[in-house]
Image: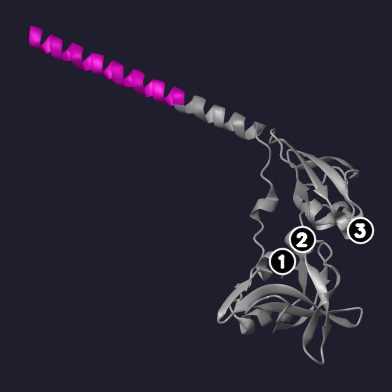
Amino acid sequence: MDEDAKKKIQIFLALAILIAAVRTGYILYERHSESVQEKKAAEAPPLNPDYYITPKKLYPYDLKSAKQLAQQPVWAKVGYRYPYFAYNSATHHTDFGKEVGLLLPLQKLQITDVVTDKAPDSGDGRQILAVFEQDGKPYTVQIGTVEGKEYKFFSDAMFFVEDPRDLYKHWPQDIWDSIGKHEMRPGMNELQADFAIGLGIPEKQADEAWKTVHYPNGGNPLTVTFHKGKATEVKPDKAS
């Protein structure tokens, strides 16, 4: 065998060894990466199923489309935030000077109509109002504004048009029992707190893992401390 042939064979063998080494290294790297990813997945907390809930929206754009709200019950998304007023069915006017109260957390309403009315000092605009009955009396709650032909609605942010108990049926029964009683207790998450005791006002905090929220709670204020999204302490809000 001449020298050129020997050199070619040596180069070929060297390349084969190098390719085999690279391939072996790549396989080992892939296996290591998979092992690291599996370890991270095992260590990571389970995904919150609440994130996958997408409540239905109606997207009203005028008075006629807003009347879809009367086709099924609705539930207030945020309690102790939206005021409602006495309504005169005969004159079709709202008594804006007589605020009756605030919608309760997850208060269920059967809207009977959607109307417009002009509130005092409202300029050229009119309020869009949902009419509902409570204890046999008619009331209205504002769900938008209209000026000329420009409609603005916030009803999708105000109401669920599907039963929240069906949307969040993965929550334990004891959680729903507390929500139904408007009670807040340790272990509940922030969304469950909203459903139970309504609007919350968070404090500014440097540590993202911790959060302190003050809830007016319909005149019975509470301070709730959350750690990583779960309530760890519930106490009367002495500052309120």
Residue 1 in sight from this viewpoint: no
Which amino acid is tagged 3? Lys
What is the count of numbered marks?
3
Contact? badges 1 and 2 (CB < 8 Å)? yes
* Corner quadrant of residue 129: bottom right
236 or 125, nearer to the observer? 125
- SS label for mark 2: loop
Q: Estimate how packed mark 1 is, as few (under 14), some (14 to 19) or many (20 or more) residues with alpha carbons within 10 Å.
A: some
Q: Which residue is mark 1?
A: 158
- SS label for mark 3: loop
Which amino acid is tagged 2? Val
Q: Estimate how packed mark 2 is, as few (under 14), some (14 to 19) or many (20 or more) residues with alpha carbons within 10 Å.
A: many
Q: Nearer the viewer, mark 3 or mark 2?
A: 2
- Position of residue 132 measured from the top left corner of the image (x, y, whole percent): 80, 79
Q: Give the residue displayed 14% in from the left and 10% down from the top.
A: 7
Which amino acid is tagged 1? Met
* Corner quadrant of residue 43: top right
Q: Is residue 119 above or below residue 200?
A: below
Task: Point out the stretch of residues depicted in magenta.
Answer: 1-29
Q: Is residue 4 above or below residue 102?
A: above
Q: Is residue 55 above or below residue 134?
A: above
Q: Give the residue displayed 76% in from the left and 63% down from the top.
A: 164
Dot label at residue 181: 3
